[in-house]
Amino acid sequence: MTITMNDSRVETIQDIVEFLNNTKGFIFKANHKKETYHWIEQTLIKFRYYRLDKPEKSLIKKYLKKVTGYSKSQIKRLISLQLKTGKVEAKTYRRHRFACKYTNADIILLAKTDALHDFPNGHSLKRILERMSETYADRLFSNLSHISAMQIYNFRNSLIYHKLNKRYEKTKPVVINIGKREKPEPNGKPGYLRVDTVHQGDQDGIKGVYHINIIDEVTQHQFVAAVEKISEDYLLPILKQLLEQFPFVIHQFHSDNGSEYINYTVAKLLNKLLIKMTKSRSRKTTDNALVESKNGSIIRKWMGYTFIPSHHANTINQFYFGIFNEYLNYHRPCAFPSIVTDKKGKQKRIYKQEDYQTPYEKLKSIPNVKDYLKPGVTFKQLDQIAMCYTDNQIAQLVQEKRSQTFNQIFQS
């Protein structure tokens, strides 16, 4: 039976007794919670419930239970609520909301930093944000320095991010299977270089510029340059200049089987500098993977695939040696693998967040590293270079210089 909360005829305790006796076998049920709660509240006030004796209170509870159809425990709870607050009201449900850790300003700062560094992977960008806060004490990055790599990828899909960076492309993996003949074994010491050449394509029978990419296996110190041709007249001077850029002594020079490096002229230069020369082994496709991956993540990413005439090599070198090589070695975090061994003795490379470092940070972390520096090179000098700009400041300069370089190339 559905009832309307109207008990104007029930005025006394005796009326309640008669009501309970005359409604045996009847089941009541209230439909509207708000109306029911209000009626319970008015009934408790009407009969001055808290001044009644225990037997009378028991009758009131039975009366409330009978009319509302509520359980005994529920009636007790509502009476207790009226005693505490003076009212019997249903609690308003409030959905739990987690506190917003990152503001819109943080997302905007993340998007701008991401664009400055040409959209590196999430772990590398996280390391840049940490360095901006910790190394350069930039308070704007104090909150973002604690962000996870996964959250970075989440924000890259957000509306605010896409309003600032309308286009984002993941790094395209470069898979080049080149055989090796001897694998360098640096054993944790710097000075073991890998080198490769990247061609900027041909157009209408005209050769494009060539990029020379040279990188240290242990520290990932990297220097790039451009040449018009890969003949010895062009290659030898730039190769010598690249070797001079490294702050540590060079012990070994490893390349593929290309004739631009495997020739008497280059061998003579390396012999003069007391640098051992090695070349690729057959059917060992991962020996030179480091420099080949950098071809895609550095040269192709920053210089693109568009044809560039070879006579612009000097223009590109002004960009490379002017600011870009400094950015690569002092401000761009790289992934350094940790080797873990499972129960079966199988080794696996994993990349932890704490293993992301700039090449210069990695160099300083090597034990007895001062023994490997070139004569006259000190960490005081190198620290001055590293702290001359923040990561974002030099990235901004790199973006500007790259735009100027492309404008000069394609408008000429």
Image (cartoon, helix red, strand yellow):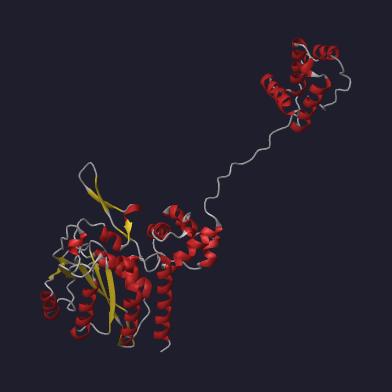
Left or right, 30 with reference to 269: right
- For this view, does 214 lie left or right of residue 11? left
Apparent side of residue 64 relative to residue 357 in the rendered image (left or right): right
Residue 310 x, y percent position in the rendering: 31, 85
Q: Residue furthest top?
A: 55
Q: Residue at x 21, y 74 (%)?
A: 243
Give the residue at x 55% y 62%. 160
Q: Report which quarter residue 334 is drawn in.
A: bottom left
Seen in the picture, residue 130 relative to 327 is either above or below; the reply is above
Residue 55 image point, x, y percent: 76, 10
Q: Quadrant of residue 89?
A: top right
Q: Is residue 296 above or below residue 127?
A: below
Residue 26: image quadrant is: top right
Where is the N terminus found, in terms of image quarters? top right
Q: How many numbered discs, if any?
A: 0
| Residue 2 visible in the shown view | no
